[in-house]
Amino acid sequence: MKLMAISIILFICMSVFQGCINSNSDYEKIIVIGETDAINGVYDPSIEYDKHGTGWMTYSTVKAPEYVSTHIAKSEDHGQTWTFITTINQAINGTIMMNNDSELQGVWRHEVSTLVNDPSDSGKEWKIFWHKYFTIPPYDVEKRLFQYGWIAYKYAHTPEGPWSDEIALFGSGFFPLEPFNTLYNLSGFHPDLAENIVYSEPGSLLFNDTLYLSLNAHSIIDGNNIGKTILIKSNDHGNTWEYVNTLLEPQDVEAYNGIYFTGSSLVKEKNRLFLLACPENPNNGIKHHLGTCIFEFEDIDKGLLQRDANDTVILHKYIALSLISGGQSDYDEQNIYGGIVLPQHNYLELPEFFQIYNTKISIV
């Protein structure tokens, strides 16, 4: 989730945005039963079903402007209702000591989680990956200190927990800065990744005993934010990782009025594999997330999406918005009632600005 929206002043007159609503939508707002810690709503859904047909959804809770935490909910009716279970990652106040002995006061945020079931990894059958980073007052988009951040990881035997301690998994180049470190410098995995300074928005999938992660990868070139979507994989339950390929380049998003794709998810339906990605254009102001594009894999083990003779990525399906901005969606083929779950920004229900919707749309 891009927290630009958190910085939007909450007293904006609702009538200004009334014309942005698509009244023809049949999307259904998800209300997480028992959720009490999301004053400004919920976002960043990741859904995964177990072998018994029980659905689990991790999501971000937002208490603007400072706090974003990771919670998990449960569904016994294929996505019709969701009930809060527990907090996995709690946003907390923190202090960073700088090299000049000055201190930075701020908050550790936990965003854009992805949940995956790895049933043959005993004691670690459930895994969660997310972006953890430090932010400082006034907590707007310019005050996110990604140099103090990383892709983090936890595991558990069951989704209810207890969850392991956090593992700082992937950093990027020189980041995170001291005194923090990660198990891996992902930017050192391959020359394709060498210029990347931030990784975020992970998506996960277990397929044929291989664990895949898609990630947004960002570099700054000539002052421009260059965003790509990459794929890595692990053949040993996440103990070691290797780079597979770059899935989406900036030119792939031009047809969808974006600058780069964000909010990646990896999903399976009828043994076909897909990438979900949201066109993003931060220059569009409040209308910066532009729905969900769905692309089918030609070969996930090689990190290849289906493309035409001109090397243009083939759009399998587009999930339109019913509100003004959103689209970092996820899906599980057992989510029969809810279908694809679509997060959106709802300016008409402030302060509950962040919301998740059942689209009741499948992929295939």
Image (cartoon, rainbow, N blue to C red):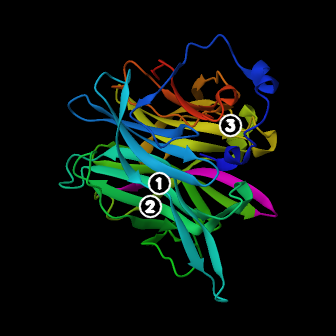
Q: Secondary structure at mark 1?
A: strand
The residue singled out by tag 1 in the image is 130
Sort mark 3 into few (<14), some (14-19) or many (20+) by Cα contacts within 10 Å.
many
Above/below status of 90 relative to 173: above
Residue positioned 50% across, 77% down in the render: 180
Q: Is residue 110 shown left or right of residue 292?
A: left
Question: Where is the C terminus found, in terms of image quarters?
Answer: top left
- The alpha-carbon separation of the residues under discs 1 and 3 comes to 19 Å
Instruction: Kindly identify the residue that appears in the image at 50 percent across and 44 percent down.
Output: 61
Amino acid found under the numbered disc labelled 2: Ala
Q: For the point 70% across and 39% down, which residue is it?
A: 253
Give the residue at the far bottom of this rendering: 100
Q: Which mark is residue 289?
A: 3
Amino acid beneath label 1? Trp
Residue 113, position as x, y percentages in the image: 46, 48
Mark 2 nearby-residue class (10 Å; few <14, some 14–19, many ≥20): many
Comes first in the chain, label 2 or label 1: 1
Give the SS element for disc 3.
loop
Please provide percent x and percent y for residue 168.
43, 67
What mark, if any, has residue 326 been given in the picture?
none
Quarter of the view holding residue 79: top left
Q: Dot 1 surroundings within 10 Å: few (below 14), some, or many (20 or more)? A: many
- Residue 131: x and y in percent read 51, 56
**Image x and y of residue 285, in percent:** 79, 40
Q: Is residue 321 left or right of residue 296?
A: right
Mark number, residue 152: 2
* Secondary-structure class at tag 2: strand
Residue range of the region highlighted in magenta in the rendering: 221-235
Residue 214 visible somewhere in the drawing: no
Q: Nearer the viewer, residue 40 or 52?
A: 40
For marks 1 and 3 on the same chain, the one whose residue lies earlier in the sequence = 1
